[in-house]
Image (tube, helix red, strand yellow):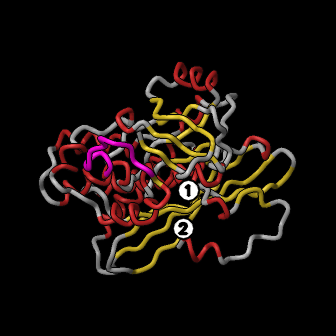
Amino acid sequence: MDQVLRRLPKAANENVLVDFATSDDAGVYRLSPECALIQTVDFLTPIVDDPYCFGAIAAANALSDVYAMGGRPVTALSIVAYPGKGDPGVLGQILEGGAAKMAEAGCAVVGGHSISDEGVKFGYAVTGVAHPDRIWRNSGAQPGDSLWFTKRIGTGIISTALKRGMAELSYVADCVDSMLTLNRQAAEALEGLCVHGCTDITGFGMLGHAREMALGSEATIEIEAHRVPLLPGALAYARAGAKPGGLENNREFASGDVAFGEAIANELEMLLYDPQTSGGLLIALPEGDGRAFEKRFPRAVRVGRVVERGEKAVQVI
């Protein structure tokens, strides 16, 4: 996909403030000097057994891109693929879970589209709003910035362990709770601070999204591996070989721009490539603003810094 997008022409429109050129989380279109639209779309195959919970996770995951751009979600359109002979009650629970999470975010579901498909897929196209001068991009990180992360990683590996029948229920519960948590509070805690760069960690994993931030910013992202917060059980399941299919794809995609220091265990490397669902925000802030953010949002963890561009886009130490 990265190679395909590079060949597409950019939109010749001065009101398009953000498009796909820097692999950002959403597109941004300026409506007026005071208002810009943020538009994104995301949908998933089932990641948990409970249909209501699956719908809510899919909603949180789709909303996350708007929060990562500094926006407020306002409307959403549902996207549904469901077997024609499937149980309508299960479909109803998926839609109810998604609607409840959208309501929590203050985002109105105004319609959608569905198709008959043997594979279940669900998600949303979400529209948000923000001031055109206060859009957060993934491409503005500056040397000297501190790097902060707002959730724990490991959802892909724990979900794989669940599918293989090897996951403890308490660990699954922690993972689900993380995926259900909106990035709304973290984004609100950043209001008024100098956000140089922001992205949410989802399908490309910590290193894939850090790579995009580094390349877009023409800097190097330095990640302190042992400071990255992990979900309970994630390290053990990585050691046990619970590897999601997307993990190797992420490694193949990003590894050419990533350098690892000595003594980084293989299972920790796996977790840094692990594809996340409804993951946290990765934020580049000046030192003073980073300390202010930590006070406002104590769950945030400093995981590294931004330095002058070196040989690799991402350095894991």
Q: Secondary structure at mark 2?
A: strand
Q: Choose between 93 and 165: the one closer to the eye.
A: 165
Q: Would you say residue 186 sits in the magenta stretch?
A: no
Q: CA distance from mark 2 to mark 1?
A: 8 Å
Tell me where the magenta segment starts and ends, as one range.
259-269
Q: Residue at x 50, y 55 (%)?
A: 62
- Where residue 48 appears, x then y in whole percent? 27, 56
Tag 2–tag 1 contact (CB < 8 Å): yes
In front: 243, or 266? 266
Coordinates of residue 232 in the picture (x, y in percent): 24, 37
Determine the residue positioned at 64% across, 42% down. Answer: 141
Residue 50 location, quadrant: bottom left
Rendering quarter of residue 203: bottom left
Q: Residue furthest left?
A: 166
Q: State yes or no: residue 267 in magenta.
A: yes
Q: Within 10 Å of the Cα at label 1, are there few (<14), some (14-19), or many (20+) other Cα atoms?
A: some
Percent across and percent down for residue 148 are 51, 34
Mark sitting on residue 109: 1
Q: Amino acid at mark 2?
A: Gly
Q: Nearer the viewer, residue 97 or 295?
A: 295
Quarter of the image with the C terminus in it: top left
- Asked if residue 22 shows in the view, the reply is yes
Image point 53% across, 73% down: which residue? 1
- Residue 112 marker: 2
Percent of width and height locating residue 151? 41, 37
Disc 1 marks a residue whose amino acid type is Val
Q: State the residue in front, 141 or 107.
A: 141
Q: Residues within 10 Å of mark 2 (few under 14, many from 20)?
A: few
